[in-house]
Image (cartoon, rainbow, N blue to C red):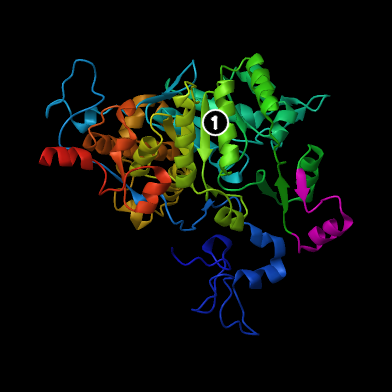
Amino acid sequence: MNLQRPNSNEATKTANRSRSVSPMSGICTRCLDGCTGNCEVFKATFRGRELIYPGPFGEITAGGDKDYPVDYSHLNIQGYALGAKGLPSGVTGDPDTAIFPSVDTGTEYGWDIKVKMKVPIFTGALGSTEIARRNWDHFAVGAAISGITLVCGENVCGIDPQLELGAKGKVVSSPDMDRRIEIYRRYHQGYGEILVQMNVEDTRLGVAEYVSKKHGLETIELKWGQGAKCIGGEIKVNTLERALELQKRGYIITPDPTSAVVKAAFKDGSLKEFERHSRLGFIGEEEFYNEVKRLRDLGFKRITLKTGAYGLRELAMAIKWGSKAKIDLLTIDGAPGGTGMSPWRMMEEWGMPSLYLHAAAYEFCQKLADKGERPPDIAFAGGFSSEDGLFKALALGSPFVKAVCMGRALMIPGMVGKNIALWLQDGKLPSTVGQFGSTAEEIFINYEDVKNIVGANEMKNIPLGAVGIYSYTDKLKVGLQQLMAGARCFSMPAITRRELMSLTEECAKVTGIPYLMDAYREEAEAILK
């Protein structure tokens, strides 16, 4: 494992002075009285609780960088020199028909009423963080034109500055939620969908009722957790008035903005921001079934569930209860996760890492299937960013995994595209971009593809971040087509666990994927005989 330094990290803008560092504490081996910093202990001496979080908030996404004993890089993909699976009916595999552009990367999820996507990916929950709010147009339009699902995350109504609540404390009007749904739908191409996620506060505020009644939304997502943290969602608030407003709406605000001491600290400038926290959820089996029924009675055609990097008990509950409730998709998010607003050390040190959690998820789904029970459709999440990761996740969880949920990796193209637009406007293109041209048409390889989708007249309204997400999705699609063709899998259902091999015996033990010197050995020995 690589050296971890628990007392310094770029995410918290801290660093050790000494070249030698105690592995356990992360403190410099020679801590000097008079040192001017800037390790985490040093900085926390005067900024305290601010050092729990990566920053600056609203300008970054941060992902844990702990190096685990076994991860997806310890799996390799098999390639074959004969055969072809998953070709269209009546097509025989030969060098003229079994070409990689013919690979079908389309997928679908749902218990009865399916949602089709052009590529087996969808966004992580883009909720109340400032990154999601500021870049929503780029994310939503990009997902819509790419033919993938977009998850509108928790607390969007709850933090809407223009939120209107009725007499019973339920949402009457949420312009920001309206905006988010309408933008995606405006450019929806018939693939994927927008769904809204709910936590404790969303349930109390009646978010499900609002998006069902006003927008006729077909899918709602219950949330048990995420890979980035084991507490509820957080954002930061930089005015006392806003902190008091959110506290009145039922959120936990720390430090307490009603405290005289806190008000004094904010007034004198030492306290610069507040944190808005969501409550912890408490789940029970009957309560879960009752909530699923309640949501179906509201008119939702599909119910999905997002769970986090909890241990095997909670994983089994999500799979078993999800099966009994006939939920339409279960997203299983592994540690360390990536987000713009989670406690940094929590991201680094809590929860089951992705590969371990996903291996157990396959095992549990197979146990249900062996008994004749149908597991819910599964999506894996937790650190994916490239086509090889997609293939490995789909193969490891086959036949239960239908897609991969991607967080930061699908946000970055939106932010990059947005910034390219600003750099073009200001005439300050960096060389990394300017080497490809001086106009959007020259820079974005898929610009004309997007124009063809939305029409020449509408193209002027398409944010460049959306073009960026389309380009990135296209890269994933073509890369996945190439890997699938090499494994002779020409459609998604053709991918199996046999397309993988473990590079270490420890990985084989964790995943059940054969060590590479054992994989296909029986077939090889039969040929030699």
Which quadrant of the figure has residue 197?
top right
Q: Quadrant of the N terminus?
A: bottom left
Does 332 appear in magenta?
no
Q: Is residue 429 above or below residue 6?
A: above
In depth, the one of 222 and 1 nearer the eye is 1
Q: Residue at x 32, y 39 (%)?
A: 475
Residue most extreme to the bottom:
33
Count the labels in the image: 1
In depth, the one of 271 and 85 nearer the eye is 85
Would residue 394 appear left or right of 319 to someone viewing this image?
Answer: left
Residue 278: percent from left, percent from top: 71, 42
Residue 104: percent from left, percent from top: 29, 26
Residue most extreme to the right:
260
Q: Is residue 27 above or below residue 263?
A: below
Three-letter amino acid code at the position of disc 1: Ile
Q: Residue at x 78, y 28 (%)?
A: 165
Crowding around mark 1 (Cα neighbors within 10 Å: few <14, some 14 to 19, many 20+) is many
Q: Is residue 40 above or below residue 158?
A: below
Residue most extreme to the front:
529
The magenta span reads 252-271
Residue designated by label 1: 319
Would residue 319 appear left or right of 525 to someone viewing this image?
Answer: right
Q: Is residue 463 visible?
A: no
Would residue 441 appear left or right of 256 to someone viewing this image?
Answer: left
Residue 480: percent from left, percent from top: 30, 37
Q: Quadrant of the C terminus?
A: top left
Residue 206: percent from left, percent from top: 72, 25
In depth, the one of 294 and 497 nearer the eye is 497
Instruction: Label 1, secondary structure: give it.
Output: helix
Q: Residue at x 71, y 29 (%)?
A: 203
